[in-house]
Image (cartoon, rainbow, N blue to C red):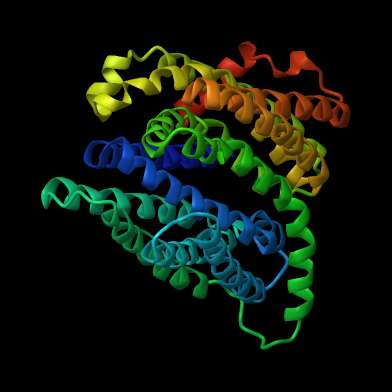
Amino acid sequence: MLRRIFHTFATRLSVALLSFAVVWLTARSLGAAGRGVVSLFVTDCAALLLFIGLLGGSSLIFLVPRRNVWHLLVPAYGWALVVCTAGTVLAGLLRPVPVSYLGHLWALALLQAFLSINISLLLGRKQEAAYNALNMAQVALLAGFLLLAFMGLGWREVPVYYYAAYVAYGVPLLASFGLLCRLPDQWEGGRGLRATALELSHHSRGAHLSNILAFANYRLSYYFVAHFVDARAVGVLSVGVALAEAIWLIPRSAALIQYVDLVHADDKHAQLAPTLRVARLAALATAAAVAVLALLPPALLAAVFGPEFGAARPVIGWLAPGVVAVALNVTCSSYFAGLGQYRINNWATTLGLLVTVPACWLLIPRLGIVGAAMASSLSYLASTTYLLLQFGRATGTGWADWLPNRTDVAYARELVKNR
């Protein structure tokens, strides 16, 4: 498991660096206002993908070890088409956006949905190398195309991001079909398809509700800032958020592998000790990375991203406590998801949302993007505290079990030595 976690972390680190390159390229080339438009588009796509997960998402990983791949893919694709179409229409009714924007939103959300479904199926079959490679290819293509257009051709317009995204999602999608076809599963006609679709729906609703609520906690502030301030402020906020949240690749890499192992394990309790050990190390590494990030001077951010983005420094500082809290949050939520106990995760994210909405409403009109960062940290801390309490009740662990010790340090050294 150590080697698999390291490889997944290494891949996610590479993805995070390339994602940082995308943030940098869009910020430098489009300015704060252009970056804000891109951020809202990405958020709109992410919102659609979340509702697509109501008939897919992590439940595909949960079910695919025991079900035919193609019987899971068909209902997931059909639901994706319905959600993308309805969601695009709704976006056009709720916000004054051009028709061209809606066209790109529909097409790119659908491409992302199909790719997400395919790679989830591959991961559920423990095709982790393919999962990592496809994720890497997607962000590498996006960064490469933007670099060529912005820096090579001097083509610095928001639509360039859309065109780059078509390439970035389309090519890996085609490759993922080839990988799925190599699996031993054979299409068996409609036999068993309806039963599989119903089972997928049953698991997905409970498993994915917490993801929808979590998205609201993570990104609702963007819409509040766009409403109370402007797109330029959203652009500055998005840079601070992107830098802070990039650190989550540390705990999420560990949690992803542990979730897959827990789903496949016959003895669930035996997974508790390695889960806690890796979680402690991930939280420690997250705290160290956040401390370094929070110490970056505004002048450095302005030099890297452009003069408008020095204002992202306070955002990072106020997000720091929440980012560290989420390192523990993802461990607990992955553990409960692996056991199929989605209700606990749903209550945790609901609690976070109950903090997010009033905090955004009260703080953003007065403090702008700093208020948005405060609201996010308060939400993360509330939901994480609830999860830690529930985890302790379920496993018998106490607060001391989350504190790193000498054994963990030796474990980390062995991990690096045998990578």
Q: Position of residue 30 (x, y in %)?
A: 25, 42
Using the rendered image of the protein, determine whether residue 22 is visible from the camera's viewpoint: no
- Left or right, 295 with respect to 355, comes to left
In the figure, residue 394 lies in which quadrant? top right
Which residue is drawn at the image coordinates 70% and 57% (left, top)?
62
What x and y, as percent, mark residue 381? Answer: 67, 23
> Which quadrant would the C terminus be assigned to in this image?
top left
The residue lying furthest to the left in this view is 153
| Residue 161 in the image: above or below residue 34 | below
Give the image location of residue 295, x and y in percent.
40, 12
Q: Quadrant of the N terminus?
A: top right
Residue 137: x and y, percent? 36, 54
Q: Could one spot residue 74 in this view of the protein?
A: yes
Q: Is residue 329 above or below residue 302?
A: below
**Could you tell whether 250 is left or right of 202 in the image?**
left
Left or right, residue 316 beside residue 51: left
Q: Nearer the viewer, residue 355 or 90?
A: 90
Nearer to me, 326 or 48: 48
Q: Residue at x 40, y 70 (%)?
A: 174
Q: Residue at x 56, y 72 (%)?
A: 81
| Residue 323 picture quarter | top right
Q: How many labels does the image show?
A: 0
Please say if 216 is above or below 399.
below
Residue furthest to the bottom in view is 189
* Quarter of the figure with residue 410: top right
At a point 39% along the width and 23% down the height, the residue shown is 312
